[in-house]
Amino acid sequence: MNATHPAPRTGPHTPAVLYPLQPDHPELVAPFASLVERTGARRLWLCQSFKAEPHQVIAHLAGMGHSTPVGTSVTLLPLRHPYEAALQARSLALVTGQPVVAGFGIGNPGFVSGLAGTPYKSPRTAVRDYLSSVRALLDGETVSHDGPYHQMHGSLMPLDHAPVEVGAGVLRPGMARTAGEVADVAITWMTPPAYIENTLRPALDEGARDRAVRPRIATAVHVALTRPGRDPRRLALAAAGSHLEVPHYADMLRRAGVSVDPHDPTGTADALLRGQVVVTGTAQEIAETLAGYRRAGVDELMLNPSGVLLTEGVPAAVADLEEILAACGNMLPRPRQEAAA
């Protein structure tokens, strides 16, 4: 079961930091963990990695002394049974002593087939059943489930640990409704603010109609400061990268009014910038755009520096994030002053 722990040291509007690549070694992620500690960023997020496995990277960082709130965005369902997923998530909460968001996603059909033999006939059912079992296990319940995608009969041994939220990767309204039913967090990537406000958030609300609250929304946003010699279009294309070739991402962007064309990189880059899928500008300008994401319903922003990280390296990416976090901090609501007596 989850223990009672002190409130987070950061405010509800403080952005988080995302390390968006597959690291060859945990030490490549350490500068980002240090940044979270130094700036009070909300959390350090890692993606699915087929190089250094994300749970082990985070545990290694904790062993180095970097104990920060963490999240996985997202690990892939076919890789582990829900029991193993719950065990890994609460192990991170134990070794870091900090809150964890355990995010899960399907992966593409070819990947699922390679591990499970066939694609999931109903991805939404697979996610609903998987997250329900993980959440119940983390809550100390005994699970009895016989479904098309996993069987689970048993429970985790009791253990005191920091809180763990269970998240679902969400791009389109169908999965948003499923996340609304069972997830604590809906995790989105490259989703423009208007699309979140007008499409995903209503679907989450619909899915959560029988729950007390809908899931929080955590959104990864590509960011890059304008600096001499930088080409925003080049950064936008580097940031979006292979996601533009993945059918469900391309479909989501079309639904959001962001036209992507593999034969027109300039037009695609302009569309990504215009649609605020990739946010560039001064630190203050980026902070103002990110405030628009919060107004659209995003509860946790993940700053994704992949464009700069891929083109200029770790120090440049960390420097960008530090400036953007400082600008966001300057925009946070401040306590009202007491009236003079």
Image (spheres, rainbow, N blue to C red):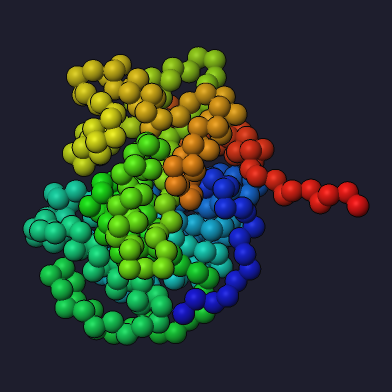
Q: Position of residue 235 (x, y in %)?
A: 41, 24
Q: In this rendering, is residue 156 above or below 296?
A: below
Q: Residue at x 54, y 77 (%)?
A: 3
Q: Is residue 316 visible?
A: no
**Lateral position of residue 265 relative to residue 298, left or right:** left
Q: For the view shown, which residue lies furthest in the right direction?
A: 341
Q: Residue at x 44, y 17 (%)?
A: 231
Q: Is residue 87 visible?
A: yes
Q: Residue at x 81, y 51 (%)?
A: 338
Q: Position of residue 40 (x, y in %)?
A: 63, 49
* The quadrant where residue 146 appears: bottom left
Q: In this rendering, is residue 283 above or below 298?
A: above
Q: Position of residue 186 (x, y in %)?
A: 37, 54
**Lateral position of residue 185 relative to residue 243, left or right:** right
Query: Which of these two is toward me, 67 or 217?
Result: 217
Q: Position of residue 265 (x, y in %)?
A: 27, 19
Q: Residue at x 21, y 24 (%)?
A: 262
Query: Which of these two is toward me, 119 or 250?
Result: 250
Query: Which of these two is toward me, 12 or 208?
Result: 208
Count how many numbered circles sit on residues in the image.
0
Query: Which of these two is toward me, 192 or 90?
Result: 192
Q: For the view shown, which residue lies furthest in the top direction?
A: 229
* The quadrant where residue 309 appears: top left
